[in-house]
Image (tube, rainbow, N blue to C red):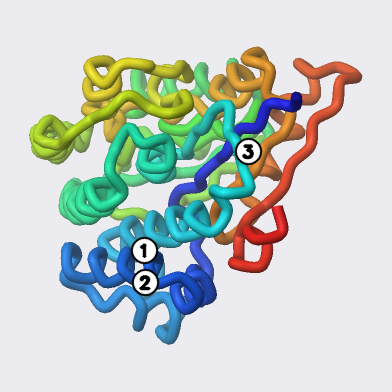
Amino acid sequence: MTKTAILFPGQGSQEQGMGRDVAEGLGEAMDLWILAEKESGLPLRDIYWDGASGDMADTRALQPALTVTNLSLWLAARDRLTPAAAAGHSLGEFAALAASGALDGRDAIRAVCLRGRLMAEAGGEGHGMAAVVKLDQATVEGIVEQAARDTGRQLRIANYNSPAQFVISGEGEPLAAAAMLVKEAKGRAITLAVSGAFHSPLIGEAADEFAAFLAGLAWKVPVFPVFHNATALPEPDPSGILPVMQRQMTSSVLWVQTLQALWLAGVRHFVEIGPRNVLTKLLAPNLTELAGEEAWTSANAGSLEQAQAL
């Protein structure tokens, strides 16, 4: 039997109207939106269903809204899937944990409401992130090391998205220095519209507060393994899941390593459960060399209709 992994996207996967069809078709999904609005104090349905697209990028609103959308789509798709494993990209890891039963869905929403607020408030002056494309990992690692060394400031690779797509995170001076080095190396650096240096030690104070909150949640044994961003490995025991998630906010997102670990675990079918097919587009660059001539399949459950057609 073909092993299936379910993948939950993070920030950058949002779109206008996301999750509306599921919420209007499933009362359980609508309840999640209502809970997220109560916990966040924000009119999430107004923003994402009827609002202007420019309002959708605020991480305080985006984190709960996208998590609710992901979980709503999972509710619509779960009777049609028997996952062998799950993974979520950054924010998406919370939906993956909820889908696996390791974390109650309502607790996951409470967690991402707090996570979004803390990350929005954690930005230091000049801190930020930039996508780096068209360069290999060794080159990007060298650029980051040189920029940090030359400026005496903090910079690190925050996301390993594919062998030629990375995100760097840090202080403004080394970010600017790295952008120049990227250009010299014939790559491209794209400044991201974020308020801080996420997935780096620079948001350590916010991460400490979030870690204390996570410690108070009821963590359970997952029904199927979740491969974690910080380690690219599953944790079968709740006592192992908690410390990994407590450092998730400041750890790099090891997405290349995660997809390859899923492949080595025997997964050959990938289902992205989120508004857009962002993660399925990353399968080919991450798996082609490892897979050789062996094939894989993928699907996207980005709407109620797609989820019910799996």
Which element carries disc 3, helix, strand or loop? strand
Q: Earlier in the sequence, mark 3 or mark 1?
A: 1
Question: Is 184 displayed left or right of 127 in the figure?
Answer: right
- The answer to the question of whether label 3 and label 1 lie on touching residues, with beta carbons closer than 8 A, is no
Q: Pointer 3: what residue?
A: 133
Packing grade of label 2 (10 A; few <14, some 14-19, many >=20) is: many
**Residue 282 appears at what percent x and percent y?**
67, 38
Q: Residue furthest bottom?
A: 50
Amino acid, disc 3: Val
> Is residue 6 shown above or below 196?
above
Given this view, does label 3 or label 2 mark the residue nearer the observer?
A: 2
Q: Nearer the viewer, residue 262 or 23?
A: 23
Tell me the residue at 79%/37% (across/down).
Answer: 297
Query: In the rendered image of this protein, does residue 176 appear above or below residue 45?
Result: above
| Closest to the observer, 228 or 164 | 228
Amino acid type shown at disc 2: Met
Camera-side mark, 2 or 1: 2
Is 94 on the left or on the right of 307, as rendered? left
Q: Calculate the distance from the C-alpha at mark 3 to the C-alpha at mark 1.
A: 28 Å
Amino acid type, mark 1: Ala
Label annotation for residue 30: 2
- Residue at (41%, 32%) from the top-left corner? 158
**Is disc 3 surrounded by few (<14), some (14 to 19) or many (20+) residues within 10 Å?**
many
Picture coordinates of residue 228 (x, y %)?
Answer: 42, 25
Q: Give how far across and how far down residue 288 sits, in percent.
A: 79, 25
Question: Is 204 located above or below residue 136 in the figure?
Answer: below
Q: Earlier in the sequence, mark 2 or mark 1?
A: 2
Mark 1 sits on what residue?
Answer: 65
Q: Position of residue 163 (x, y in %)?
A: 65, 26
Residue 294 position by quadrant: top right
Total marks placed: 3
